Image: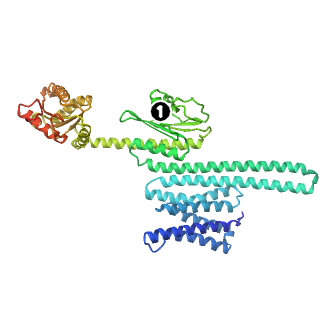
Amino acid sequence: MQLELINKKKFIYIYSILSIIIFIYNFIVNDYLTNNEFPGYITITFICIYLLNILFIKLKHLNNIYFFYSVKLLQLIIASLIIFGDLITTSYTALIMYILIVIEVISTVKVETKSLINKIYILLTIPLVITSIISCMEKRTFSPLFFTVQIIVVIIGIYIIYNSSTNALKNQIEVQKKLWLEVKNKNKDLLASKKQTQLVHNQLVKQKNELEEANETLNKVTAEMYIQNELLSYISSVLDIEELMELVTDSILGAIGVDTCSIVIYDTINNTYHYKVKSTYETDYLLPFIEAMKEGKLDEYFILGEPYIDNQVTKGKYKFTYERAVGSLVIIPIIKDNNTYGLLIAEHKSSNMISENSIRFFQNIASQINIAINNANLYRKMEEMANRDALTYVYNRNYLRKVFNDLAEKVQTNNKSLSLALFDIDKFKKVNDTYGHLFGDQVLKIISNISEKYVNLNDGILGRYGGEEFLIIFPDKTLDEAYQIMKEIHSCIKNTKIPYNDKLIDINVSIGLTSYPEICKSPADLVKRADKAMYVSKDTGRGRITIDNIDL
């Protein structure tokens, strides 16, 4: 094996520039901005890498392959440690330095055997793998390891592209030399040599074009990986479905280069669909997309359960595209427990724009959307539990207070009605003392279930206000409308017999009812007035409804 040291000075120049940049950055940021007296260990590290390279080239130590490997391995270890450090700016610089060292090794070493290729792979990747594993254990996240896998893919890609193109070019050069020797020795073969040279030239042009395409693909994949990482870091922190869909569509539209991005997700908790459409066109396509969904024009893709690609879309082929210009289209299902509950759709106006790499990218995004939605649903369930009474599972007093305050502000602004009922179970202490607290809990549950049925039918809000007290809020209901509902609730409770051993126990409630603006001058007085009316019911014989009036 041999070493080619022709480009060593060029790499030294690049290391020099990087070292100067990081020194200036650390000097300005750490010295002038944070008043530190020393530029930091990061600056020293890069300068040491630079000085070591100069020293070893001057002493011609790098002509020894094993010494060369040792130096490069040390540099890779230092760079990888900085990559996973806490400073983002120096991490980026270290990543650039790491890739630069990789390119230096690839361009310097002549590969002669397959075993050497494997050794070089190990040399270039093992420092990054080890430091990423250490970082994963320290930070308790797989992000460093996931990031390392991407860098390794890039390194292997660079290695493969460089070797394949370099070997091909060397082979062609040998062919050209041989042809020119034949031309020199045999003048009569000039025409044949000319044709052969032209053929070789065409092959080189073809290889150059292929190399440029490969480089373009590599750049695109790298960009997609970066975008994906950025998306994942944001997606993991989003707990609202609408906000999540807004983030994903904006990111895909702005970074991937598609013309339209659409998402539809079924919300299992609220039994409804969420829609989002973003497009580079001026037209708003959200309503047509919702109509297409309701008309079943996307049902087949929910049933398909796998990615759908069309790189030759003709005008009018898909009804949900609403006659906009579409040449390429991909539909990615969002799946949970083998059931498709959402679709991610990306469109491009040009044909043949959806590649296998694009499919993997969109599938990864769909997977992260799935995780984020599961997190959001879990958060909503926990939030819902925090708003509910543990025994009856109707709303608790804190939630009622929050809802009432919001409604009170709205009805004053919009001049709407707001009625409120407060009721108490009659002689509930005697029920507990006579039949026990377990029976008392059962009574509370039955009363809340009866009330909740009527309240839900009339768009009201029911909550447990105190021990045996319940509060019902009736938005946009007049006093008379609320009274008719409370009559039904009272009648149902009164006629309900609750079994206890071999007995049937009667239960009744005392109700106070008031309304704004018919009775109360301010929504803030509703609870106090309803409570006063309820105590009038208790003082006048219990088991009745008292409607608030100015004489109470």
Lateral position of residue 378 relative to residue 90, left or right: left
Residue at 43 percent of width and 69 percent of height: 34
Q: In which quarter of the image is the C terminus?
A: top left
Question: x%, y% of residue 163?
Answer: 69, 55
Which of the 4 image quarters holds residue 179? bottom right
Question: x%, y% of residue 485?
Answer: 20, 28
> Which residue is label 1 attached to?
289
Which of the 4 image quarters holds residue 180? bottom right
Residue at 67 percent of width and 52 percent of height: 161
Question: x%, y% of residue 292?
Answer: 47, 29
Q: Can residue 428 be seen in this view?
A: no
Please tell me whether residue 514 is drawn above or below residue 212 in the rendered image: above
Please tell me whether residue 466 is drawn above or below residue 103 in the rendered image: above
Q: Can residue 375 be seen in this view?
A: yes
Q: How crowded is mark 1: few (under 14 residues within 10 Å), some or many (20 or more)?
A: many
Three-letter code for the amino acid on which mark 1 is drawn: Phe
Please tell me whether residue 287 is drawn above or below residue 39 in the rendered image: above
Lateral position of residue 376 relative to residue 406, left or right: right
Label 1 secondary element: helix
Lateral position of residue 442 relative to residue 261, left or right: left
Q: In which quarter of the image is the N terminus?
A: bottom right
Residue at 8 percent of width and 31 percent of height: 542
